[in-house]
Image (cartoon, grey):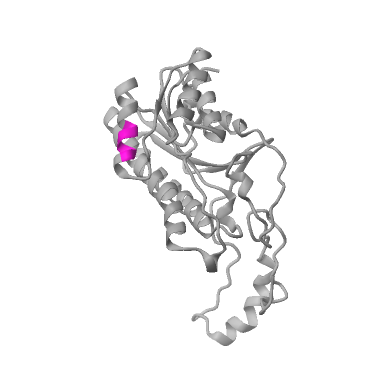
């Protein structure tokens, strides 16, 4: 389906894996695509594949980990296709380390690309979309890692920040016809090969075709999704899952306010049953017996 005929789309970090799948599906849907990757050879390989299938695409090796790089990426789209209709923030990196051993450099390296890169690219693209007056679509990339993921304080924090930015931008940009959503994609990539469980052991995950996230991205970027903004979806493999926005759950009320003694009587008795699975893989809540020295 040519849902994006005449549109121009940008996908960051799209020389391989999930991002490449996005580009190929966007091109198939009729969009002209800017394939962005700091590895220009990989970006050009994707462009050649798209052009070989009759699509339109250019490569751009701008580094979106700086405001200047992000702006140059948006400018490249405007210069080549005279418009920006779609931005997919896919670029990412990992610097996995357990919390007590993580360095400032490892934290900052991930925050710079995921959070600031997403912010800079989205701001530049949204300003261009507002100027054009035709609306547009931004699709961010978050992850179930922001539920909690062993050894990934930096990555989990970044993905949580991106989810919060998605909600906020959807509210602010709707007046300009710009929709903002996010996906938490599945796919076997170089990044997924680094995953560890809560004990720090390597986990052999099943192979999932990373390109299977592309169809949902195409739909979210099309006018068929004009009623969808501020939402996050789990994508990839066989699933399309709605990620429920954080909200207050069971609430205890005490007239006049709470004191420590009242909380002590009520907290565990009334709320512990509400404490569900913890962590990205959704294992049962591990702390019902308490947290003590020597806990694994």
**255 is higher (above) or lower (below) than 228:** below
Can residue 121 be seen by looking at this rendering?
yes
Which residue: 34% across, 33% down?
A: 73
Residue 226 location, x and y as percent?
A: 47, 31
| Residue that protrudes farthest toward the front in the picture | 41
Q: Residue at x 54, y 51 (%)?
A: 245
Q: Residue at x 40, y 51 (%)?
A: 112
The residue lying furthest to the bottom in this view is: 261
Q: Vertically, is 133 above or below 119?
A: above
Quarter of the image with the C terminus in it: bottom right
Quick one: which residue is furthest to the left in this view? Answer: 131
| Range shown magenta | 69-74
Q: Where does the image place residue 110, in percent across and percent down from the top left?
A: 46, 52
Q: Is residue 273 above or below residue 138?
A: below
Query: Is residue 29 something one can see in this rendering?
Result: no
Q: Quadrant of the N terminus?
A: top right
Please say whether residue 141 is one of the residues in the magenta stretch: no
Q: Nearer the viewer, residue 167 or 210?
A: 210
Q: Main secondary structure of the magenta part?
A: helix
- Where residue 200 appears, as percent x and y from the top left, is 66, 60
Q: In this rendering, would 50 be left or right of 277? A: left
Count of numbered tags: 0
- Residue in view at x 70 percent, y 38 percent: 207
Residue situated in front as seen by the camera: 36 or 286: 36
Residue 71 at x, y percent in the picture: 30, 37
Q: Is residue 72 magenta?
A: yes
């Amino acid at each position: 389906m040519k849902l994006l005929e005449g549109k121009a789309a940008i996908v960051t970090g799209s020389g391989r894996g999930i991002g490449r799948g996005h580009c190929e599906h966007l091109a198939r849907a009729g969009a002209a695509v800017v394939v962005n990757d700091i590895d220009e050879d990989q970006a050009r390989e994707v462009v050649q594949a798209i052009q070989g299938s009759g699509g339109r695409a250019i490569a751009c090796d701008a580094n979106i980990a700086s405001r200047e790089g992000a702006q140059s990426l948006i400018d490249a789209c405007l210069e080549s296709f005279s418009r920006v209709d779609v931005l997919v923030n896919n670029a990412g990196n990992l610097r996995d380390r357990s919390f007590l051993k993580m360095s400032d450099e490892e934290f900052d390296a991930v925050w710079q690309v995921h959070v600031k890169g997403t912010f800079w690219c989205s701001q530049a693209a949204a300003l261009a979309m507002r100027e054009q007056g035709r609306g547009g679509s931004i699709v961010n990339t978050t992850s179930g890692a922001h539920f909690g993921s062993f050894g990934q304080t930096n990555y989990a924090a970044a993905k949580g920040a991106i989810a919060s930015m998605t909600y906020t931008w959807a509210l602010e940009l709707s007046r300009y016809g710009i929709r903002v959503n996010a996906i938490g994609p599945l796919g076997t990539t170089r990044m997924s090969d680094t995953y560890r469980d809560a004990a720090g052991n390597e986990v052999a995950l099943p192979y999932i075709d990373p390109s299977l996230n592309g169809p949902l991205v195409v739909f979210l970027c099309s006018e068929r999704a004009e009623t969808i903004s501020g939402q996050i979806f789990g994508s990839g493999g066989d699933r399309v899952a709605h990620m429920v926005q954080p909200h207050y759950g069971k609430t205890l009320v005490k007239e006049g306010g709470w004191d420590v003694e009242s909380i002590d009587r009520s907290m565990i008795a009334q709320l512990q049953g509400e404490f569900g699975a913890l962590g990205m893989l959704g294992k049962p809540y591990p702390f019902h017996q308490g947290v003590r020295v020597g806990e694994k």
